[in-house]
Image: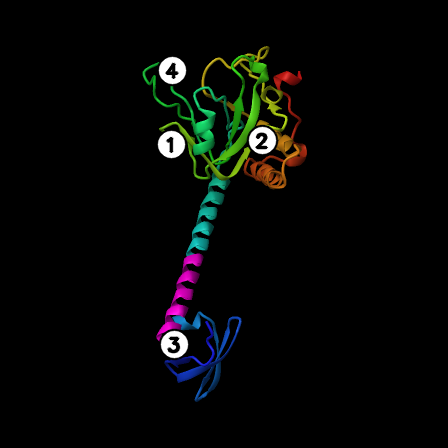
Amino acid sequence: MNMQNKTVFHRKFGKGIIVDLNQNKLSVQFDAGKKIFLYPDAFRQFLVLMEKDSKSYVDGMLKEMDRKEEISNRIARKMERHNQLIDKLKLHPSSQIVIRFFENDKTEFLQDNVINTGLIQTGKTKGSPVRPSRLHQNSACILTERKEEDDESSRTIFGIAMLEEDFLGTECQDGKITLHSKYVLLLPDHLSKLKFWNYYADERYPDKMVWKSGEFRYCSNLISAQILKDIMSLPNENDTAALAEEFYHYFCEINQIEESTLPLPSGKLLE
C-alpha cells in the first residue's frame, strides 16, 4: 500500500502527514518539523493512522511480524532445550538400532515414517511392546531387509534415519519409534545396496551371521557413522547427496565422533 500523504496522529506532535517511506524509515511532517520513525514498528506505540484502510493494512503487517517472531522464538527455545539435552547426554557406545523388517511392513513404514519395536515373546510381559531403552536423541535407525529365500549374509541396508529430536526410549511404552522430520535417507532401488554384515558382527555368535529373533538389535554408534559416510560416496542425486553429507556431520557432532579418526567398517563379511 502507498503510504504517501497518509494522515497520522502522534501523542506529542499531534497530526502529521507521511511524506516519505524508504525501506523501514518513515518520514512524517508535523507542525513542529519533520520526524523519522521506524516502519512499521512506530505504529505499535507512537503513531496512529487516521484512515481505516491504512490502519488495517499496517495492523495486519504487525500481526504477521509478531507471528513470525513467535515462530522464530519457539524454534530458538526448542534448539536451546535440544542443545542442553545434548550437553547432558551420557552417550551409550551402542545406542543405535537396526530394524530387520520382519514384524514391520516396509510399505506401511514408507507411508507413516514410524517403526515398531516388536513384541516381547516370553515371560510375564509377553505380548507387550519392547521398550528401546537405550535410544536417545543421538540414535539413528538403520533400516535393513533381505529376501525370504536368501540367507542372513545377504541382508542389505535400504535406509537410515535419525529418531525424532525429543524421542526417549525409556518413555516409549507403545513400541513406536518416530523418525526425524529431516534426517531420513532412503536409498533408491537402482543403487547398489550396502551389505549390513560388512559393518556388523554379533559378539554372541562371532563365527556366524544369524538373526534368530527380535525385530531390532542395538549396534555401535561408529557403525551408523560408517554407514552414513559410505552413503555419501554413492552416486546420489544432488538433493540426496547434500542431505547425506549434512546428516553425516550432524550425526558425528551429536555422537561426539571425530570424523578424521573414524575407523573403517569391520563387519563379519569383511573378515
Residue found at the very far top of the displayed protein: 207
The disc, 4 or 3, on the residue closer to the chain's N-terminal end is 3
Name the residue type under label 2: Pro
The disc, 2 or 1, on the residue closer to the chain's N-terminal end is 1
Residue at 43% in and 20% down: 103
Residue at 54% in and 31% down: 160
User: x, y (%) of residue 265?
Assistant: 64, 24
Residue 121 numbered mark, or none:
4
Q: From which residue to which does the magenta span run? A: 51-69
Q: Disc 1 on helix, strand or loop?
A: helix
Q: Is residue 50 above or below residue 245?
A: below
Q: Disc 2 on helix, strand or loop?
A: loop
C-alpha separation, residue under disc 4 versus residue under disc 2: 34 Å
User: x, y (%) of residue 138?
Assistant: 51, 35
Question: The C terminus appears in which quarter of the rendering?
Answer: top right
Residue 49 numbered mark, or none:
3
Name the residue type under label 3: Leu
C-alpha separation, residue under disc 1 versus residue under disc 3: 54 Å
Q: Circle 2 sits on which residue?
A: 188
Are the residues flagged by discs 2 and 3 in contact, CB closer than 8 Å? no
The disc, 1 or 4, on the residue closer to the chain's N-terminal end is 4
C-alpha separation, residue under disc 1 versus residue under disc 4: 20 Å
Asked if residue 135 shows in the view, the reply is no
Q: Circle 1 sits on which residue?
A: 171
Are the residues flagged by discs 4 and 3 in contact, CB closer than 8 Å? no
